Amino acid sequence: MLIAVDEVQTPGYSVLAALLLFIAASVWLGTVAQKAMEKKDFMQGFFLGNRGLGAWTLALTATVQSGGTFMGFPSLVYSFGWIVAVWIASYMIVPLTGFAVVGKRLAQLSRQTNAVTVPDLLRERFGDSRVGLLASVMIMFFLSFTMFAQFKAGATIMEHAWPGSGILALTEDYDAPVATQSGESTESAAATPKTFRQTMRTWFPLSSKYYIGLMVFSITVVGYTLIGGFMASVWTDLFQSVMMVIGVMLLVCLAVPMAGGLEAASRAAVASTSPALAFGPGYSTAGREFLTPGLALSMFFVWVFAGFASPASMVRVMAAQNTEVMRKSILLLSCYNCLIYIPLIMTCIAARSLLPDLGKQSDSVIPRLSLLVTRDFPFETGQFVSGLILAAPFGAIMASVSCFVLVIASGMVEDIYAKLINPKASEKQLRRATTISMVAVGMVAILANLNPPQYLQALVVLSGSAGAATFIAPVVMACYWRRATASGALAGMMGGFLVYFGVYSCGWMQNWATGNPKLPGAELILSILGQDPKIGPAGFFRPYYILGLDPIVWGMLASVVAGIGVSLLSKPPAPELVKRFFDVRPTSTIGGTA
Amino acid sequence: MMSHANEHPLLKSARREAIAALSIWLLTTIYCVGYCSLYGYMRDPGDPTSSGRDPQSLTYILGFPDWIFWGVVVPWGVCTIVSGVFSFCFMQDADLEN
């Protein structure tokens, strides 16, 4: 962090003002949401918005779920060049697969089972409480990592938005790039123990602005989610998605002409780096191959299957009003993705030629660029406009934290409290349990972030893909396969989870051994796993690539094989159970739902 | 495959749509990854015998490198149109309540 802050890089009060505006708007949306849901059954209203999602709210919130896509992504384009377009290319198909593969059936099953959560649905569908319990534990495990990281990101953005804090870098994990001294990005694994020891010396190692940011962020987000429930989370998500597209459109319209057009920008960027910026596997000074064809193939699995098999997006689909809303959502989200990703790539290529020397500070490309392109706006309005552009990712973080807090709390209340502890709970008790669990989740997140671990961002990617590898087989089987059994669903979850984590942890061992070749055991590990292939993004928590493919492919394969295999080996499910979910009901029992 | 006379109509249409969507996904994946692997990877400058493109041969279409244009931008547009047609002409509405 030695590069001096130059004149276009100091966000004044405008960024802070824009963030506070966002917070105020979200709290307001939370109170509006509360009025909208007060009527029916508390659980259905609070956790599913009475299944009333319309096309816009469904499209723009179901699969665009983390601010991460918008924050890490520009930095990748800046660093590696055009190949990142291939990395994200599967988003062209995500809207279709996101709603058309399991969407309709999931929405139907969730009504037939009267499920509020995904574990609820799986438990009823397979008629086995173990399936629900395992799913619940898995979901809480995955989402906790992601959620803790987002709390940290929110706090850090507030810290950096404070005037005089230097450039606002839009990364979800600030410490990772800062901690490195040599090599590309987080290459130096040897730095870990040292940094760890330093941070252990004191309980509160970070600046007081960070803690103020953490408190303000946590209290507002948990607060408005507590007030407005599911609808508050959905509406803030919609709000930030709209702000995001406005921001991207502004940036692309200002930055690309400023760089003299896209081709000129691309040529200038190539001239200042190497032709590798315009080709695969991507530009790198450290000899890393960012995206080999095998990894490009893997990305078509990662985004597509994490898109519809992740618990947070399944909940949104369960809340869809009707099938017409889903159909419209496919088209809306397709158009939205067109407006976001390719323009964002164009913007970052332009940034590569306008701001050629960011080096390791590539995470700050969007804040710097927005301050640069709005520099000549009259009457200082540029500052405020760039403040709003920067507030959009902050809104994305708030929206996803709100969604995760809700999913975790719904798991604790519906799957554990109402199903196991107090099955006869009154509405008042459920309300109280909801408040307690959400406040508890917020407190744990604050405690976890008092001294936040490094490499959280890597754990976020990991838990997102792990969710897909775990749930893909059970969910598809639940929707379409009559012969699927509870044991098969359990095996599918465990199989996907264990294989995914197993393959991933081989990568950590390989990395550790590469960083500490003299330590006992390192040689043995490297002789089994082989040397670091130097592909994929850098970082300590790198996966192990079997046949050059991402672990998600192997995890999904294991999930499917285990799910089908164990289903066939176990006793067929009870015919009444299958009938209930697959066949038309005899007309005499209409009204038997609920 | 066993046929089930009483099968819920939503299930039939949903299954058909799932198969169609996954087929479109498969085609897209094969085309994009295939095209970009063939035309988007640069020849190793230190090894003239290696496969891949000569960086001098790169042209630009509407400002995009040619292989990005044909391998990502065009299929992205096609996918968006296909998704629109899929959602309005192929995918069927169904009653979720019964």
Image (spheres, coloured by chain):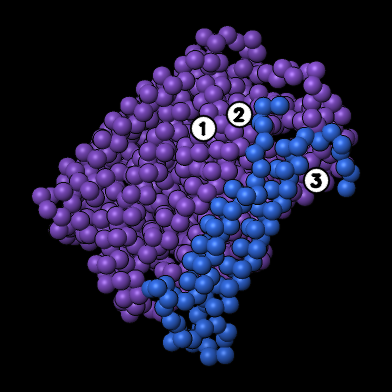
Chain colours: A purple, B blue
Q: Is residue A288 above or below residue A568?
A: below
Q: Earlier in the sequence, mark 3 or mark 2?
A: 2
Q: Quadrant of the C terminus of chain A?
A: top right
Q: Is residue A320 above or below residue A273?
A: above
Residue at the image position 36 percent from the left and 47 percent from the top: A244
- The answer for which chain carries disc 3 is A
Q: Nearer the viewer, residue A199 or A163?
A: A163
State which mark lies toward you, 3 or 1: 1
Please name the amino acid that badge 3 sits on. Answer: Ile
Q: Which residue is mark 1?
A: A53
At label 3, counting other C-alpha atoms closer than 10 Å, the crowd grade (few under 14, some 14-19, many 20 or more) is many
State which mark lies toward you, 1 or 2: 1
Label 1, label 2: how far apart the Cα atoms are: 16 Å
SS for dot 2: loop
Residue at the image position 44 percent from the left and 21 percent from the top: A36
Please name the amino acid that badge 2 sits on. Answer: Thr
Residue at the image position 18 percent from the left and 51 percent from the top: A382
Q: Which residue is mark 2?
A: A117
Q: Nearer the viewer, residue A140 or A198?
A: A140
Q: Earlier in the sequence, mark 1 or mark 2?
A: 1
Instruction: Indicate left or right for A395 with B51 as reference.
Output: left
Q: Which residue is mark 3?
A: A564
At label 2, counting other C-alpha atoms closer than 10 Å, the crowd grade (few under 14, some 14-19, many 20 or more) is many
At label 1, counting other C-alpha atoms closer than 10 Å, the crowd grade (few under 14, some 14-19, many 20 or more) is many
